[in-house]
């Protein structure tokens, strides 16, 4: 074997890019990719002595957006590269020195602002050719880099400010839920910024996507955003969140998850497909099927829900079959999309709201309809109370949030004879009423989820901080 000059690496390795000023970066070794890539942002082209150069910034450490290294390099090419998700993207290519263990050689790196794999660098087969063999079961064969060493190496590159910059994307700054989120963030030492969704506009650009705010400010420096999109702004709001995501700014709920949760029928299909229970439901396009639709949900009484209805007001109970038929036909003649659902009588006008953050039920309340109604979500906290939820209900709620891909979700559950059933998963659940009822710091739990995601830890002030280190 002529492998004596080749080094063996695992599927993840620590490398250094000394000419870019990057002392340590964890690379994913991927022989399935031809080119190597580094996750860069703020990529800007410029000329130096008639040559094409780029400047860019790198977050060399995973889950850490506060450590930033600014780099410059000559452009050797511009190339269309297909990412692992299959999306073609035009990227700058630079050439620089790669160091691994005590070996170093020149490699080509493409600059990309896609961050989907979590790794800041990807080592493709071109850079490995003739030098490296991969043992996919191993990792860090070139050595581990301890946390303290990273901190030391990057101490000059870490932003000093102690808090994160978090943007709340919503419509009304005075809405109690929004007020609570702003407070909770500030309490934890972050800088909170309220942005009216309608006043944001964006620049779609392969290298330098941007979000602007009325007045000309650019919002690209945020660490995270919390979207609270009003139902009538779903389309624009999701586009805006997607734009933040493409800049590499973390969104507490992703655009994709918000979009799918806003489509009630699609959500129910997703939940069912993943083995979660909902009340038996029917859906059809033509009024001819009305009678069969009613049979499908075991006749009257039944609930008819307008799919695009405003909260609570598009949900109607038909006590008799005849009432059900006229209701369905009337809605149909208005071209409304509707869902027919078995009526869970035994719920007795109650439902449960479970608040899920980051895979956990933070708290829950029970809501009770006013006498004569069956809709528990119409009137506010007056009728809500704390409630002991079962393990099964907890599991149902966390799984529903997971299936919908929501980090933050208000999951509505109804207790039926057959056990708990899912009614709905809400991507912008109201905060102030459940906090009032349960006394839990729900807004704080949302902020903590961002801190965890970004690997942010509260820095405690120590006397050492007061004087410069010698
Ligand atoms: P929305 O939140 O858009 O008004 P929901 O589907 O959550 O629509 O329904 C509103 C309320 O109506 C629920 O909170 C629940 O109290 C009641 N409800 C909904 N579906 C049923 C059902 N199938 N059986 C009994 N009550 C229901
Ligand atoms: Mg609801």
Image (cartoon, rainbow, N blue to C red):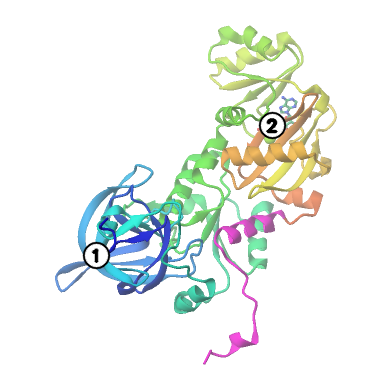
Q: Position of residue 292 (x, y in %)?
A: 63, 8
Residue plotted at (56% across, 48% down): 253
Say which quarter of the image contains residue 130. Answer: bottom left
Task: Pick whichever, 165 or 214, lies toward us.
Answer: 165
Residue contact between numbered discs 2 and 1, judged by CB atoms under 8 Å? no
Q: Which residue in the structure is indicated by mark 1?
A: 95
Q: Residue 422 bears which disc, if any?
A: 2
Q: Which residues are magenta?
A: 442-470
**Vertical arrangement, residue 157 with respect to residue 11, above or below:** below
Say which quarter of the image contains residue 220. Answer: bottom left
- The answer to whether residue 111 shows anywhere in this view is no
Quote the CA–CA distance across marks 2 and 1: 54 Å
Q: Position of residue 108 (x, y in %)?
A: 25, 61
Which callout, 2 or 1, points at the residue further toward the start of the chain? 1
Q: Residue 326 bears which disc, if any?
A: none
User: Which image quarter has ligand 2?
Assistant: top right
In the rendered view, does 357 fall on the left or right side of 220?
right
Task: Quadrant for the N terminus, please.
Answer: bottom left
Task: Pick whichever, 244 or 178, lies toward us.
Answer: 244
Any magenta on residue 448?
yes
Which of label 2 and label 1 is nearer to you? 1
**Vertical arrangement, residue 4 with respect to residue 262, above or below:** below
In the rendered view, does 278 fall on the left or right side of 145?
right
């Amino acid at each position: 074997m002529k492998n004596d000059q080749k080094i063996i690496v695992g599927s993840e390795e620590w490398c250094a890019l000394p000419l870019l000023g990057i002392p340590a970066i964890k690379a994913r070794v991927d022989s399935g990719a031809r080119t190597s890539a580094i996750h860069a942002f703020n990529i800007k082209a410029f000329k130096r002595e008639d040559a094409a150069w780029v400047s860019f910034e790198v977050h060399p450490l995973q889950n850490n957006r506060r450590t930033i290294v600014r780099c410059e390099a000559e452009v050797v090419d511009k190339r269309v590269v297909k990412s692992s998700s299959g999306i073609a993207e035009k990227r700058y290519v630079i050439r620089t020195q790669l160091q691994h263990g005590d070996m170093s050689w020149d490699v080509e790196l493409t600059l990309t602002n896609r961050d989907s794999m979590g790794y800041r660098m990807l080592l493709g087969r071109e850079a490995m050719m003739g030098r490296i063999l991969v043992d996919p079961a191993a990792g860090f064969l070139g050595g581990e880099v301890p946390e303290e060493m990273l901190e030391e190496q990057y101490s000059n590159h870490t932003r000093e400010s102690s808090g994160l910059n978090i943007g709340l994307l919503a419509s009304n700054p005075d809405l109690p839920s929004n007020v609570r989120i702003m407070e909770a963030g500030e309490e934890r030492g972050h800088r909170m910024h309220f942005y009216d969704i309608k006043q944001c506009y964006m620049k779609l650009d392969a290298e330098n996507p941007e979000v602007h705010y009325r007045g000309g400010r650019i919002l690209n420096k945020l660490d995270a955003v919390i979207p609270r999109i009003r139902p009538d702004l779903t389309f624009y709001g999701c586009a805006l969140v997607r734009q933040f995501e493409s800049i590499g700014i973390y969104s507490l709920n992703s655009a994709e998850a918000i979009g799918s949760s806003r489509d009630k029928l699609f959500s129910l299909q997703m939940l069912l497909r993943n083995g979660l229970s909902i009340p038996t439901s029917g859906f059809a396009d033509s009024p001819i099927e009305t009678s069969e639709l009613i049979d499908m949900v075991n006749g009257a009484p039944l609930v008819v829900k307008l799919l695009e209805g405003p909260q609570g007001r598009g949900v109607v109970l038909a006590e008799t079959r005849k009432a059900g038929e006229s209701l369905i036909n009337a809605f149909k003649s208005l071209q409304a999309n509707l869902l027919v659902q078995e009526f869970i009588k035994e719920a007795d006008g109650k439902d449960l709201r479970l608040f899920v953050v980051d895979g956990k039920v933070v708290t829950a309340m029970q809501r009770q309809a006013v006498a004569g109604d069956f809709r528990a979500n119409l009137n506010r906290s007056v009728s809500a109370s704390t409630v002991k939820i079962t393990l099964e209900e907890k599991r149902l709620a966390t799984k529903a949030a997971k299936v919908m891909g929501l980090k933050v979700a208000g999951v509505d559950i109804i207790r039926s004879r057959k056990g708990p059933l899912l009614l709905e998963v809400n991507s912008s659940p109201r905060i102030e009423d459940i906090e009032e009822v349960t006394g839990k710091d729900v807004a704080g739990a949302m902020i903590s989820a961002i801190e965890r995601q970004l690997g942010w830890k509260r820095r405690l002030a120590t006397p050492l901080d007061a004087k410069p280190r010698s």
